[in-house]
Image (cartoon, coloured by chain):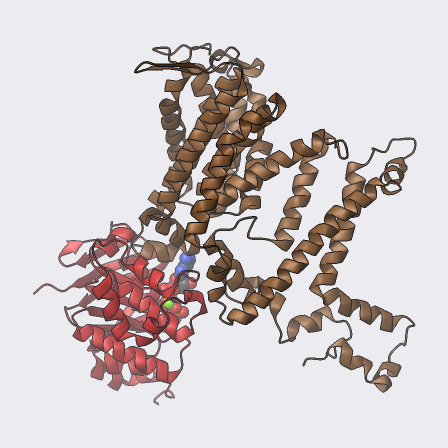
Chain colours: A brown, B red
Amino acid sequence: MTTISGEAVNHPERMASRSPAPGEGRYRALVRLSRNDDVRRFVISVVGGLVLALITGPEGNGVQMLSGINGALLHPHVFICLAVTVGVWVLITVRHHFARQVEHVSGRVMALPKAVLPDRRVRAGLWLALFAFAIIYPPTLNSFWQNVLVEQIGIYVLLAIGLNVVVGYAGLLDLGYIAFFAIGAYSDAYWTGMLPVHPPLHLNPFWVFPLAILTAMLAGVLLGGPTLRLRGDYLAIVTLGFGEIIQIVANNLQGVTGGAQGVINIPHFSVHVAGIKYHWGLSNLPYYYLILGFIVLALLAYFSLEHSKVGRAWTAIREDEVAAEAAGINTLKYKVMAFAIGASTSGVAGVIVASQIGFVEPGDFTVQLSILILVLVIFGGMGSLAGAVVGAAVLQWLPQFLRVHPLFGYNQLDLYIYFGAILILMMIFRPEGLIPSRRRRREIVLAEHGVGSADAMESGHSGGGLAAVANPEADL
Amino acid sequence: MTPVLELVDLEVRYGSVPALRGISLVVERGEIVTLLGANGAGKTTTLRTISGLHRAHSGRIVFNGRSIEALAAHDVVGIGVGHVPEGRRIFPRMSVLENLEMGAYRRRGELKDDLERIFQLFPVLGERRRQDGGTLSGGEQQMLAIGRAMMSHPDVLLLDEPSMGLAPLVVKAIFSIIDQIRADGTTILLVEQNATQALQLADRGYVLENGEIVMSGPSEEILGDQRIRAAYLGEGAAS
Ligand SMILES: Nc1ncnc2c1ncn2[C@@H]1O[C@H](COP(=O)(O)OP(=O)(O)OP(=O)(O)O)[C@@H](O)[C@H]1O
Ligand SMILES: [Mg+2]
């Protein structure tokens, strides 16, 4: 049964026997058009552009509720928004058709992911270029952008790399990631003697790093150990709760954490080792290089983990936990390991931020922040280090760029609306993320060819059941 | 000689619902033993309990003279129990080669000889070594699942309905490979619904019904039993 609308048109007698509503033909043409992916995407992009204009436009008010809409849609501004979204559509359409051609030529489905991906040497070169750029470029920036580089980009790249291990490698949904950031920050405050409770010995924040890493890791193991035995969904809930608990504890345990006012005067970093003497002061650049150092360290460590036995265990766990266990993998151990590694990375970031700003307060550690970092990882491409780095950098840089740019200058309160929109677009057009890992790309390709996912219906040429549902004229 | 695998009065429950009501079973070295039973009889439960994926309520599981009922699943693999789970459960987005490598996760050392052996048993896996597991046909996936379990060098291979959903010819091929694996020195506990073929392959059999063993003996004996013929071999009830 493969009646499609096109055939129905060729049977006037049958048509006549039904209610011949005027415009039915037009309706059917529309239905057919709407099945074309390119057209569908185009419509979405136009609607998206209008919504973008609406969101970025002026606010309405109680007296004239529509003034916001007028101000947004009857303003040249709308053309900029449309240009952006339609531009995205053009890019995607071109890419899509190009990809299809490659697939057609290469013939074999399995050959595609490797063929499209640049080879190892090219990738190593790109990494080196990125690294060189990250070293050379920042000193040329003004202090505003250097600050953005530290507080908005660097820290978040580090956080995203850490969460990528948890979410991307081991496939664990951690919604309380920022709690470990808080643990790092408060560890810093504690060991430098700035909390109401005093440490056995005062340390320079630089030496807090190992302690904070251990503390965050321990917290990760204590939280993950019992929870990770359970099904995946529980972890999300427990970590969500843990994030809240940490924040509430920081708020209410006044005698220990200083309560809602937070902690001030956390000292900056300094080193006095083997004749080297350096003090991190108020300028941003030294912090930037410190973060860059940690990022590079984390990248090297996680890259080698990914390509070791541990990484293969994580992949197996993501694919099929029972089969992994039956293959002799201690699934609990590796899940806790991923969780703890993520936690310690978050802890390091906490120490850096606390010592750079010199101030910590419970309000810094909201669930929103955990979710933001998750968004960065998904945007970049789960399970891909390059994705985490570039994704976080782009998505953290863009709002700052737009904020100071004369053409846009959006309202900061709207930020999460944009993130939501970007994520939705991403899920529609590029679910594997900005720079997907090879395996993730493979998952998507396989899903498109009907292996392992409901997405299989999308590319079905059989026209069977789904077409009948989508087509109101189908002869049932 | 002690048996390779022995279940002693094994009781397993899901919550408070009993799935196995105290079964005892012996597998001697070099045997193929088949465990038969209808849907829901408890065959999968038996295998999952042996390999540590599920905990026994009471009773013992003795492997090479050692009690293993408290061992974690990943450690049971390490001491020589290979499990080919129900429904194959290969890793769909790993290549054939990667799947096989996962099977050897607990082992150190060179895998080349093992891979060669697997490809000798299953030439089709060799041809498709770079293909993703999820894109293999059902029969190929079953072969991959068996190959993956063999990569751990098991003493005993637990096979859960390897014939499920496969064409008769493919079943025949797989069963003859199972026979060959046994000839190479691996003891086999085969769970099947396909009773006739399983009994033709196996030395001995057990019949499980509602979590209890209702019959056991040499294959010919079970094949000849009227009740069994009626219940499992698809012949009309003998009046
Ligand atoms: N996870 C579970 N939770 C609760 N009950 C279960 C669970 N797994 C199995 N059971 C029950 O235990 C009994 C035995 O199931 P089992 O899967 O061992 O049967 P089986 O002999 O393998 O059947 P089949 O031939 O259909 O695979 C069934 O009644 C089943 O409903
Ligand atoms: Mg079963």
Quick one: A343 or A405, which is closer to the camera? Answer: A405
Image position, residue B19 (x, y; %): 35, 61
Q: Nearer the viewer, residue B213 or A402?
A: A402
The foreground one among B87 and A5 is A5
Place of residue A399 in the rendered image (x, y in percent of width and height, measured from the top left): 66, 34
- Quadrant the N terminus of chain B occupies: bottom left
Report the front residue among A295 and A451: A295
Q: Is residue B179 above or below residue A94?
A: below
Image location (x, y in percent) of residue A394? 59, 39
Residue plotted at (25% across, 50% down): B71
Task: Tell me what residue is drawn at x 33 percent, y 54 percent.
Answer: A325
Name which residue lies at 18% across and 58% down: B62
Q: Quadrant of the C terminus of chain B?
A: bottom left
Residue B95 in view of the camera: yes
In the figure, is residue A325 to the left or right of B1? right
Quadrant of the rendered image holding ligand 1: bottom left
Q: Give the number of callouts.
A: 0
Residue B184: x percent and y percent?
17, 72
